[in-house]
Image: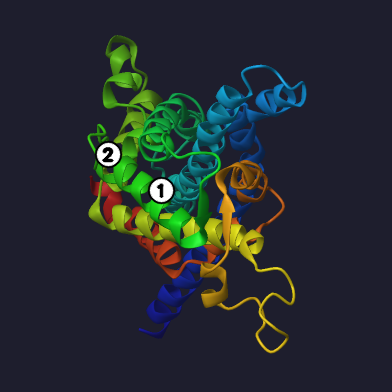
């Protein structure tokens, strides 16, 4: 009995150690992929060309400013969404693979075929490219339409407070996430994973055993992404991300020193609500936010997401599910 207890304890400790090492891999992978994500967003939403053009004082300046308004808000909002999705999608994928690898290391010694051979791992993880490619393009289209609906008529001279900015942001989010305001609503998992028809199943005639395993992994991942639990955790990440974005913006809404007398420090939430900036001044600030959101140098933005308890618990549940021997019976 003691031997059995010791064996169970050792297995649990090994599994815990493997899980924790896997989470560190997740964090490093997120940080290593952020520059690629940032470049992809800037490639699609190139505001730098417009700002360079404005310096030449062209005749259609107003038109260019209007374009810049839509592009700068779109790219920052897309940066928040896609960074949150990248963090969670990697958590799901690497913990599914991590669970299977744990089983491979502890079970294949009994002569069973590996559940996740290297070819399968590579094929499976390459599905991540959808979020950086077609998924990103589709998300940009949806966000741009919502930004246009919400901010299109906003004059460049109009002043906005931080609270006004938050209200506009909430309207845009409602259109993107829930399809409010006549927007076509797609499930958010659609931006993270290609449709089933686009997966390897399309080449059903010549599927190898590895292809079949990869399809099984992709289907299990899709089930996870479409689960209510995943939706709840993703929404928590979005809230954290957009709050951090507003915190970053708040730095620019501080009253000038001495504006309220020396007794009142100019950092209280009340004092921020009295400060308004014209839209034309807000645009360059919003435009530059992508560099702190998609930053591979651990920024507050990504750190906040990685530290969310719900994200850690969800990751642990995924790993628990896929590192349990009963997965082998499926």
The answer to whether any part of residue 18 appears in the image is no
Question: Which quarter shows the N terminus?
Answer: bottom left
Quarter-wise, where is residue 140 in the image?
top left
Q: Give left or right: position of 147 versus 83.
A: left
Quarter-wise, where is residue 238 in the image?
bottom left
Give the residue pinned by disc 1.
96
- Image coordinates of residue 280 in percent, x first then y, are 60, 41
Q: Residue at 44% across / 70% down in the picture?
A: 309
Q: Residue at 54% across / 27% down in the picture?
A: 67
- Image coordinates of residue 300 in percent, x first then y, are 63, 61
Question: Which quarter shows the C terminus?
Answer: top left
Crowd class of label 1 (few under 14; some 14 to 19; many from 20; radius 10 Å): many
Say whether marks 2 and 1 touch (CB < 8 Å). Answer: no
Q: Residue at 58% across / 78% down in the picture?
A: 268
The answer to whether any part of residue 244 appears in the image is yes
Q: Residue at 53% across / 51% down in the picture?
A: 159
Q: Nearer the viewer, residue 184 or 213?
A: 184
Crowd class of label 2 (few under 14; some 14 to 19; many from 20; radius 10 Å): some
Q: Nearer the viewer, residue 265 or 248?
A: 265
Residue at the limit of the structure toward the top, as seen here: 205
- Image coordinates of residue 328 in percent, x first then y, are 29, 48
Label 1: which secondary element? helix
Q: Nearer the viewer, residue 255 or 320?
A: 255
Disc ID at residue 187 = 2
Q: Earlier in the sequence, mark 2 or mark 1?
A: 1
Label 2: which secondary element? loop
């Amino acid at each position: 009995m003691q031997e059995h207890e010791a064996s169970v304890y050792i297995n649990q400790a090994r599994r815990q150690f493997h899980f924790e090492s896997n989470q560190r891999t997740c964090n490093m992978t997120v940080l290593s992929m952020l520059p690629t994500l940032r470049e992809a967003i800037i490639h699609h939403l190139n505001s730098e060309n417009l700002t360079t053009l404005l310096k030449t004082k062209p005749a259609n300046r107003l038109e260019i400013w209007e374009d810049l308004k839509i592009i700068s808000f779109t790219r920052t909002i897309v940066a928040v969404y896609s960074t949150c999705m990248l963090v969670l999608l990697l958590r799901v994928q690497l913990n599914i693979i991590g669970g299977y690898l744990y089983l491979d290391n502890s079970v294949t010694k009994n002569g069973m075929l590996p559940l996740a051979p290297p070819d399968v791992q590579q094929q499976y993880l390459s599905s991540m490219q959808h979020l950086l490619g077609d998924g990103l393009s589709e998300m940009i289209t949806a966000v741009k339409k919502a930004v246009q609906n919400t901010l299109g008529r906003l004059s460049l001279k109009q002043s906005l407070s931080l609270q006004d900015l938050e209200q506009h942001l909430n309207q845009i989010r409602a259109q993107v996430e829930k399809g409010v305001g006549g927007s076509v609503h797609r499930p958010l998992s659609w931006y993270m994973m290609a449709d089933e028809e686009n997966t390897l199943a399309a080449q059903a005639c010549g599927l190898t055993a590895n292809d079949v395993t990869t399809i099984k992994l992709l289907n299990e991942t899709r089930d996870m992404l479409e689960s209510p639990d995943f939706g709840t955790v993703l929404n928590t990440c979005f809230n954290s991300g957009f709050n951090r974005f507003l915190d970053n913006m708040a730095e620019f809404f501080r009253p000038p020193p001495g504006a309220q007398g020396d007794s009142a420090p100019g950092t209280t939430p009340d004092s921020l609500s009295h400060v308004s900036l014209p839209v034309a001044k807000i645009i360059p600030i919003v435009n530059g936010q992508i560099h702190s959101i998609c930053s591979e140098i651990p920024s507050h933005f990504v750190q906040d997401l990685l530290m969310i308890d719900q994200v850690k618990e969800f990751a642990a549940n995924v790993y628990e599910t896929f590192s349990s021997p009963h997965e082998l019976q499926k």
